[in-house]
Image (cartoon, grey):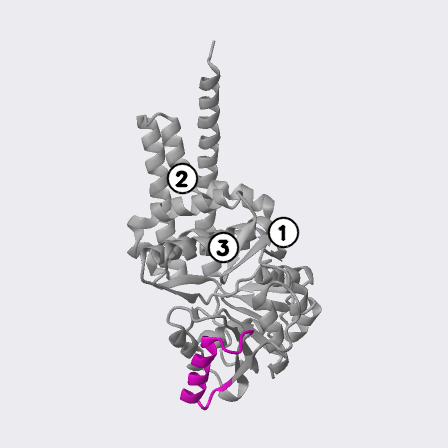
Amino acid sequence: MIAPWAWALLAARAGLGGCLAGFGVYTALSAWAAWQWRRARRAPNTDWTPPVTLLKPVCGVDAEAYANFESFCRLDYPAERLQILFGALDPADPALALAESLRAAYPSVDIGLVRGGANAPGGQNQKVRNLAAMLPAARHDLLVLCDSDMRVTPDYLRRVVAPFAPPAAGEAARPVGLVTCPYRGCRPASLAAVLEALGIGADFIPSVLVSRALEGMAFAFGSTIVLPRAVLAALGGFEALADDLADDYRLGRGAKHAGYAVVLSDYVVDDVLGRERFGPMWARRLRWARTIRACRPAGYAGSVVTHGTALALLFLAAMGFSPAGWAVAAGALALRMAVACWIGAACTEDTNILRYLPLLPVSDLVSFALFVASFCGNRITWRGERFRLLPGGKLARL
């Protein structure tokens, strides 16, 4: 008679083996999805330069903040067609002083400051409240929202607005309602920052590309969101998002459900990480994980198969560290590293993956720990404030 523990071990081996098979399928899908996204690139109409207002909500000073802000003042874009607005709910926010310095250093750039959030609606999402307070000062109808820790190159704006160009004669297409950008970790200056950069480039972005390939784009990222003011109004404006944690996700989903095309740009934005400590990095990534779990619960639970490194180690232990277990674990890890390197080198130009490849298994284990921890509570920390995350991604302040 087989002992109960033996049945449990057989079940664990079978379950982990099935998950590893799913990981193999997912990894192949991620390579295909990245290749599909890369092949879909086409030369944008960079001569099309509609008037744009760039909204830059700030709260405190991020790593290399002045250089990040300055990159938006060096855009290859007609000066008379670009307005840059910095805004903070706290009128004494130190990031506004940096924006003031930029305004003095670049007098030819139309830079405006919105202090204090006088027009801010009620709600728990401080970034959305800030954006709502900034909107009345926007002079142009095409809006670009961009988080404060992003850095860009001079061709950024021409490329991200290009999908809104009128279609060529005889070309029928669903109207574009929103454009968003993938991003990669940039200039990590600590171990925690390197682990975050690897988590972004080798874990998060491949999952985005798989979702794009299988379901189409129905989400967006704070790295860049471009949308006309009329589309924002049709979605209820910023006020409709004032209690949502995942405001970027809601904008993308709302645009798709309203019948618009949501485009993932081929421009990859740099997210400047700097010298990060482990605690804040963990808190931020746990917030992201719990946000995705709240917004896409079924898909998030199924994403357990994407954690190949952790699954391989668990399978190895369940196999009693047998030669077969070692062979499967080594094969899974080799597949993981090869595909991550290929996506980073050939598609997203993310140099972090090759540069810090020996740390990728460590990054994967951190990502798996975050995945597990995301199911162990509903509290998050955001910019030093603590919230309870309600079903559907709503926020309640603690």
Residue underneath mark 1: 390
Residue type pointed to by label 2 = Ala
User: Bounds of the magenta span?
Assistant: 89-111
Residue type pointed to by label 3 = Leu
Q: Is residue 312 left or right of residue 57?
A: left
Residue underneath mark 3: 209
Residue nearest the viewer, comparing 199 with 19: 199
Point out the residue furthest to the top here.
1
Residue at (68, 65) in percent of width and height? 240
Point out the residue furthest to the bottom here.
107
Residue underneath mark 2: 310
* SS category of the residue bearing label 1: loop
The tag earlier along the polypeptide, 3 or 2, is 3
Residue nearest the viewer, comparing 375 with 219: 375
Residue 225 lies, with reference to residue 215, above or below; the image says: below
The tag earlier along the polypeptide, 1 or 3, is 3
**Local crowd size for mark 3, using a 10 Å CA cut-off: few (<14), some (14–19), many (≥20):** many
Residue nearest the viewer, comparing 288 with 205: 288
Residue at (57, 56) in percent of width and height? 387
Q: CA distance from mark 1 to mark 3?
A: 27 Å
Q: Is residue 56 magenta?
A: no
